[in-house]
Amino acid sequence: MNVTSAGPRWWQGATMYQIYVRSWRDTDGDGYGDLGGVIAGLDYLKWLGIDAIWLSPTMPSPDQDWGYDVSDYLGVHPQLGTMADMDKLIAEAGDRGIAILLDLVPNHTSDAHPWFIDALSARDSAHRDYYVWADPAAGGGPPSASPDPAAPPNNWVDAIGASAWTFDDATGQYYLHNFLPGQPDLNWWEPRVHAEFEEVLRFWFGRGVAGFRIDVAHGLYKDALLRDNPPLVGGGRLEGSFGQRPIYSQNRPETHGVYRDWRRIADRYAPPRLLLGETWVGDLARLASYYGDDDELDLAFNFPFLFARFDAGDLAGVVERTLAALPAGACPVWTASNHDVSRFPSRWCGDDERKARLALLVLATLPGATVLYYGDEIAMTDATVPAALRRDHMTPGVGTGGRDAARTPMQWDGSLTAGFTAEGVTPWLPYGDNAHRNVAGQRDDPGSTLNLCRNLLALRRAEFAGRLVAYERLPAPPGAWVYRSGPLLVAANFSTETVALDGTAGEVLLTTPGREVRERDAELWLQPWQGMVMRAS
Ligand code: GLC
């Protein structure tokens, strides 16, 4: 591995890039993106200035949840490629100074995993205790003298709002699944589960994988007594769902011990391997707890930032509360899109490219790590996915596309196949609505969003690589956010008014929306939704 700044904390100041592999580039003509496609895109990502790629799940899976239901943690999904392809990808990325992160799913497996198949075979099977089993109504529903399979052990709900328990007729117990029934939750009270995953970490770290994005990192342990979750009173999307506050099924204190163990393993490698958690929590103190005493996760995804309104005060508030909450030396990580949520150019920006550029400017200049989602750099928006073409089982009936709306093929060029696959091949998900927004159309245009993004990432690398710079908010007119980030001074106008930045001075390094406003930049005026990066004087 040859990560740009392969120092002890190479992710500080790094730019990571999430590739949803099935939608990136199809090189074998089956309509699904593949590892060959990731390899084919490496030169582009080097040109763009990416330090690390996080690949959405690459392990074998029956794909009830597109790889988030793993049936072999030590393999490569045949639809995506072979182990030789993975090795080649790691090597070729390394040659370009790009690190590869895999997606690890430790909260649950697929029901097709050999562990679960064995667990189902008998109550005394070798792998029975790898999963969470409970008798009907135990600790939850109404007590019953003769167990009633209609009474699940407690009130927990799964990702689609049904009971999180499925009854297995053959062995007469329920198993737990916080997501789909095909994703049985692992039992982290079982020491052998710890040993299995430590083996998985060592296997991939040894192959040159630079780290893991850890799926449902706030999951893992479940309450030993399987107590009912209390009702959700108030609280937003991150506090609970389906009327429940999941205090007994998530964020259990024992989970922290898993990350302390993993961190000891990851830190033994050179460079140290990265643990980046999908910490789906609303409370920033809780988020901070996943960094431990600088001995748990290296990075914990910040969903309060992602779900904040696109507003100067709201975003600045989350950033400042995050920085205040994190333990000393901990590195924040900012992201605005991923495969589970609406893309930020749609959600934050209503398809207004000025706003998307402003968002990229902020993402690139906040201290810490940042993670872009494929297509962010061209301001790719959500697609409309008609019901008949939906592929996601968790959001089949949602809005105009559910999660599929953010998973459509990368827009490489303006051709009929968007450069994603060969002509005549049907892509696994339909092409986006705004195909005119594509890499080929923007690459040679110096004023494009793509080139703005590239320039921002170059600046970011020059000033931030391998470092965690200090942040300070400076006075700003209403609607604007002005901050110092290490040697950079950033001014961002989140309003529909032109604002004057009295007293904010510095050499202008870069502006949005582009060259046409350069003259005015010198006067330190910001157009609506314009952002500017200066060198602090
Ligand atoms: C995470 C993934 C999501 C998946 C779920 C279950 O939230 O990001 O895509 O459906 O976990 O694994």
Image: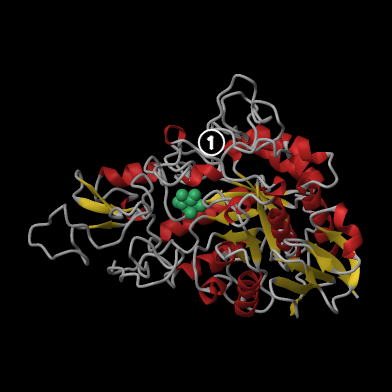
Measured as percent of width and height from the top left, residue 316 is found at 66, 73
Q: Is residue 272 visible?
A: no
Query: Which residue is tagged 1?
Result: 77
Q: Hey, what amino acid is under mark 1?
A: His
> Left of 155 or right of it: where is 475?
right
Q: Is residue 396 above or below residue 463?
A: above
Measured as percent of width and height from the top left, residue 522 is found at 91, 66
Measured as percent of width and height from the top left, residue 174 is found at 24, 53
- Residues packed near mark 1 inside 10 Å, few (<14), some (14 to 19) or many (20 plus): many
Would you identify the image quadrant in which residue 335 lies? Answer: bottom right
* Numbered marks: total: 1
Q: Secondary structure at mark 1?
A: loop
- Residue extending furthest front? 497
Depth order, front residue of 167/364: 364
Would you identify the image quadrant in which residue 357 lies? Answer: bottom right
Q: Is residue 494 above or below residue 131?
A: below
Q: Is residue 279 visible?
A: yes
Residue at the image point whose x is 38% and y is 64% from the top:
189
Would you identify the image quadrant in which residue 463 lies? Answer: bottom right
